[in-house]
Amino acid sequence: MWFTMFDIVLLFFRFILNIFFREIKSRGSYNIPKEGPVIIIGAPHANMFIDGLLLMRYVKRPMSLMIAQNAIKYGHYVGTLARAIHATNSNTHFKLVVLNRPKDLAEPGKGKIFLNKSKADPLRINGINTEFTKQLKIGYQISLPREYGLSEITEIISDTELVIKKEFKETKALEVLSQPGGTSYTCMPYVDQSNLYEIVFEMMNSGKCIGVFPEGRSHDRSEIIPLKAGVAFMALGAMAANPGLDIKIVPWMNYFQAHQFRSRAVIKFGPPISISSELVEKYNKNGLDRREACNKLMEIIYERLKSLAVIAPDYETLSVIRAARRLCKPEHCKLEIDEVIDLDRRLINGYIKFKDDSKVQETYKKVKEYDQLLKNYGLKDYQVQKTTIGKFRAITLLLYRSFLLVLCSILALPG
């Protein structure tokens, strides 16, 4: 049997993964139903290339992936391979579900916007040298810098005044809106996703499996960023459109050191989420009930994802926790990658629960100082006990490294 482009690309993907990772551990794949409609959701979404490859490799059933139109159109390597699959694949078991995101169609707003405190109306936004009537429409969204806030436009009063649906409450958002001279902003058009939902509804009714990254973009943060509600609309909408349909939502996470070649990776699938009939009934009522049903399902999804991921309050805490884990591990013991992830998660949960205890604070401070000292000296934990060496070994090591330095310098001269 001749290989299709789809088979060739998948084989190439497997080859790439085996090169990039030294070891990949998969846990909980039994949680994926072998048949019936399934939506697999993953977060944190660290890498749009690697995450999709890992998911396609370790889901033990035919599946499809949702990918942004922007990635297909403009992505260099990802886009080329995705276009190859999308254009030539005749395999009905796999399909790329292409998503048009409003942010991919966004454009910088003209002028600056600010919040007029004198009018005491948090929903009213004013502009300086703006052209709201020409650049914006009702239903469009305005986005603040650095993702400080996003809100839909409900009324355009003039070129310099409009009304938003939801006020900006975050401290950072209020700061930039209150600064002298206003702040820059981005205009995001309304995108009709009805065709996308129809495709997903049809796939779910046919018992297919689809992978979705509900954060909407890849990032390098340790925490889960706000999830998009689209996955809830897909699941509830499909069940509402097809009575008796039982969709399972399977959370999954992957962990790997994105900046380290030949690192280890772990993939973990959590227990499937069952959607109650009460939520579907509430979704069918439209209006606020529909929104409430989607919000409730998103809360459940977020909690399930959070239970799988290693989420620290900030990067500093994560670094200290990892240092503490390395100190706790006996020298003769080698932990598997999934055991490392589990231990990190337990330590973080314990720290968050008891962080106000004086002993915990003192230990945190000492571990932080130790970790910083290692970074200052450029050492790893296992090297600490080997820092004291004899004169003979020190001289030998100096000569050896000097020889390497000279050799590498000579080889580098032609370039």
Image (spheres, rainbow, N blue to C red):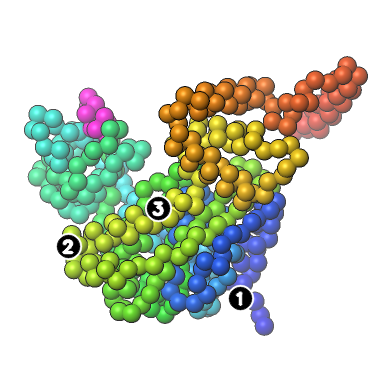
Seen as rendered, the residue at the extreme bottom is 1
Q: Which mark is residue 303?
A: 3
Classed neighbour count for the residue bearing mark 3: other residues with Cα under 10 Å, few (<14), some (14–19), many (≥20): few
Give the amino acid at mark 1.
Answer: Thr
Determine whether label 2 and label 1 are within 8 Å by CB: no
User: Residue shown at 61%/59% (left/top)?
Assistant: 26
User: How much space separates mark 1 and mark 3, taking CA atoms?
Assistant: 40 Å
**What quarter of the picture does the N terminus occupy?**
bottom right
Q: Earlier in the sequence, mark 3 or mark 2?
A: 2
Per the image, the residue denoted by label 2 is: 287
Q: Secondary structure at mark 1?
A: loop
Q: In this picture, is 388 found above or below 14? A: above
Per the image, the residue denoted by label 1 is: 4
Residue 177 drawn in magenta:
yes
User: Residue shown at 19%/38% (left/top)?
Assistant: 130
Left or right position of 178 against 257: left
Residue 255 drawn in magenta:
no
Q: In this picture, is 130 found above or below 37? A: above
Q: Earlier in the sequence, mark 2 or mark 1?
A: 1
Q: For residue 14, what is the image quadrant?
A: bottom right
Does residue 314 appear in this view? no
Classed neighbour count for the residue bearing mark 1: other residues with Cα under 10 Å, few (<14), some (14–19), many (≥20): some
Give the amino acid at mark 3.
Answer: Glu
Q: Nearer the viewer, residue 235 or 405?
A: 235
Q: Secondary structure at mark 2?
A: helix
- The residue segment tinted magenta is 173-181
Give the amino acid at mark 2.
Answer: Gly
User: How much space separates mark 2 and mark 1, taking CA atoms?
Assistant: 46 Å
Left or right position of 56 against 44: right
Q: For residue 148, what is the image quadrant?
A: top left
